[in-house]
Structures are given as structure tokens and as C-alpha cells.
Amino acid sequence: AQKITQTQPGMFVQEKEAVTLDCTYDTSDPSYGLFWYKQPSSGEMIFLIYQGSYDQQNATEGRYSLNFQKARKSANLVISASQLGDSAMYFCAMSSTFTGGGNKLTFGTGTQLKVEL
Amino acid sequence: EPEVTQTPSHQVTQMGQEVILRCVPISNHLYFYWYRQILGQKVEFLVSFYNNEISEKSEIFDDQFSVERPDGSNFTLKIRSTKLEDSAMYFCASSDGLAVYNEQFFGPGTRLTVL
């Protein structure tokens, strides 16, 4: 079974600073994907970044980067130059295939990030 | 940019009533999902759907739940007899492939309140 662990229920960061949100995972699948989603107070789920288990390089998308350490089974999200609009809940999720085909996401419990002036 | 849409945005119902949550996935996507998020908790997988049948369902997805693709565009989640504990945000998602790298695009969610 897949499991995602996010140990930081809440984080604070000063505007313009960088912040790292932790995510560890557990799976026996050789092939999997790791995703980060942002959920603002309005409730929608916004895709941020993806890392594949076989990707050699860490993923980057603008101010978002993923610090992927496969041996440690961690996939931490780094947000550089934080902005007030980054205040939101952040979820780490893992995709895996299952018997019968298809794909599903397993989510962590999330980290509430607050960006302060 | 294509997006997943969901209606209604908020549904209030009495316990024991049937509700149908509607989703319009991205038009060229073939794989559809429902997730739910109880207030303050993590997002949980309910069911995946492909080729007009359920691919997988979680233990949450019991006999009171059903899904359907009644036409070429809509994807619905029906809860036959709602319980208080069904109160949650329900997200529909779609993807264009089965691989682990295929992003699932989420709709804005339907907030279900069972009284």
C-alpha cells in the first residue's frame, strides 16, 4: 500500500524568503509519480509540480522545485521568493498503477503555509 | 485552457436523501476519478472510471455510491441515501492517460452538506 507523510501541519515564512515543505512516501511499486498540489482557501486543487520515480533530475516549475531523494523516499517542495499569494494548504500526492489498469492518487495530510510580511 | 467543471458548487441535503454530483471532464480525457475531502482532512480516493466501467474503488465507495457517464460529456457521482458523515468536498478529476506521470486535472469541487 502507498503512504504519504507530511509532518508539518503548519509553516510560516517571511515574504521573499524560501521555504521547504516536507514529504516522505512509502511504496513497493518500482514506478510511481509524486505530485504537489496547492489548495487555497477557496478550495480548488491546483497542480504545481511533478516528479517521476525514474527522473534523473529534480523537477522545477518557476518558483517551485522538488528536492527528490529516492533513497530516502522524500520529495520535498521548495518554494523560492515566497509571495503572500502562496498562503494555502499544500498537499503531496503519489500516483501508482493498480491491477486492472488506471491510476489513483494517494494524498498526505497537507501543510498549511502562511506567508507573512 | 481546458478545465474540469463541477456542478453544483455547493449542495445542501437532508440525511437519507439522494444526491447527484455532476462533472464535465476535459473533452479528450478518457480516465475519470472522484475524490473526497472531509473538512480539515486529506483528500481520499473514491473511484476511478474508464471505458464505461469502474476500474478501481476504495473501501469508502460502498453500495450507496455509484458513478455513471450518461452521455459523452458528463460524469456523475450518486449517493443514494446520504449520511451525516458524507458531508465533504467532492472533487472530480480526469486524465488523458494511465501512466503514473499523467497529471490528473481537478475540478473546483462540490461542497456537500448533509443535515
Image (spheres, coloured by chain):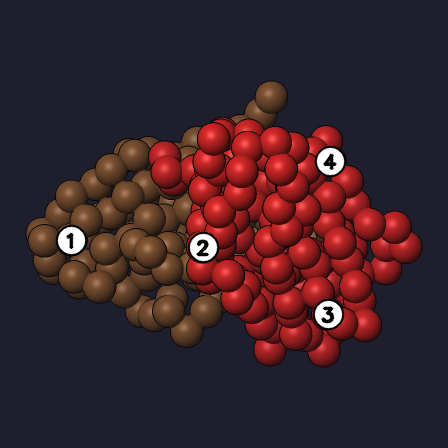
State the SS at label 3.
loop
**B80 with respect to B5 (left or right):** left
3 or 4: tag closer to the N-terminus: 4
State which mark lies toward you, 1 or 3: 3
Residue visible at 47% across and 31% down? A117
Q: What element carries label 4?
A: strand
Label placed on residue A10: 2
Q: Which chain carries label 4?
A: A
The circle on residue A73 is: 3
Query: What shade has chain A been given?
Result: red
Q: Which chain carries label 2?
A: A
Alpha carbon distance from label 4 to label 2: 23 Å
* Mark 1: secondary structure: strand
Could you tell which of marks 4 and 2 lies nearer the N-terminus?
A: 2
Residue, x 58% and y 67% (percent of image)?
Answer: A4
Which residue is at the far right? A56
